[in-house]
Amino acid sequence: MAFKNRRFPHLLPESILIWERWLSRHADEFDRFDYDVRVGDGRDPGPDFDDNIRQDGLDLSKRRIDAVGFTPNSITVIEITPLADLKCLGQILAYPILYKQTFQTTLPIKTLIVAGHIGTDMMPAIREHHIPYNLV
């Protein structure tokens, strides 16, 4: 039986546990959250496909932000993961740029990693880029 996650789309069970723990302590710092936020252009499968198939291909291939938190004065792009590794670091650096490009917001965009652990050799890069993180 496949795992169904309706509350936090595309989060895996271990990430959901981390996120729920974090929410229990920090949810009131935000007005609301959006989940599975699609950003970027996606990849067009090409003119050999019908328009509806092309649109589905574009939509399904867009990057997906785990969570976006909103306050009246800012937007926070949140990456939720059991292990903050190199992939996570790349996502948290790229997603704010793609979010701004996709939604044309003028609000400041912040970032946050919510993780169970920080991967080996990741702290120097996290510090260098001033990326906020919470370990749960």
Image (cartoon, grey):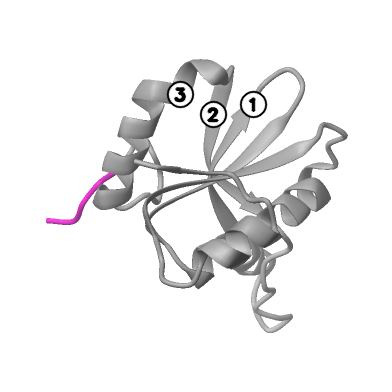
State the image quarter where residue 7 is shown.
Answer: top left
Residue assigned mark 2: 33
* Left or right position of 50 against 28: right
The three-letter code of the residue at mark 1 reads Phe
Please name the residue shown 21% across and 51% down the image.
3
Q: Is residue 73 above or below residue 1?
A: above
Asked if the residue at tag 3 contacts the one at tag 1, i.e. Cβ–Cβ closer than 8 Å, the answer is no
The span from disc 2 to disc 3 (Cα, nearest Å) is 12 Å
Q: Is residue 113 magenta?
A: no
* Left or right position of 62 against 24: right
The secondary structure that dominates the magenta segment is loop
| Neighbours of disc 1 within 10 Å: few (<14), some (14-19), many (20+) | some
Residue assigned mark 3: 26
The quadrant of the rendering that contains the N terminus is bottom left
The three-letter code of the residue at mark 2 reads Phe
> Which mark, by number, is residue 70?
1
x, y percent for residue 69: 59, 31
Q: Reading the chain from its start, which is encountered first: label 1 or label 3?
A: 3
Q: Could you tell me which secondary element the residue under label 1 belongs to?
A: strand
* Left or right position of 98 against 116: right
Write the start and end of the magenta stretch as one range: 1-5
103 or 32: nearer the viewer: 32
Q: Could you tell me which secondary element the residue under label 3 belongs to?
A: helix
The span from disc 1 to disc 2 (Cα, nearest Å) is 6 Å
Q: Reading the chain from its start, which is encountered first: label 1 or label 2?
A: 2
x, y percent for residue 11: 37, 49
The quadrant of the rendering that contains the C terminus is top left
Name the mark nearer the viewer: 1 or 3.
3
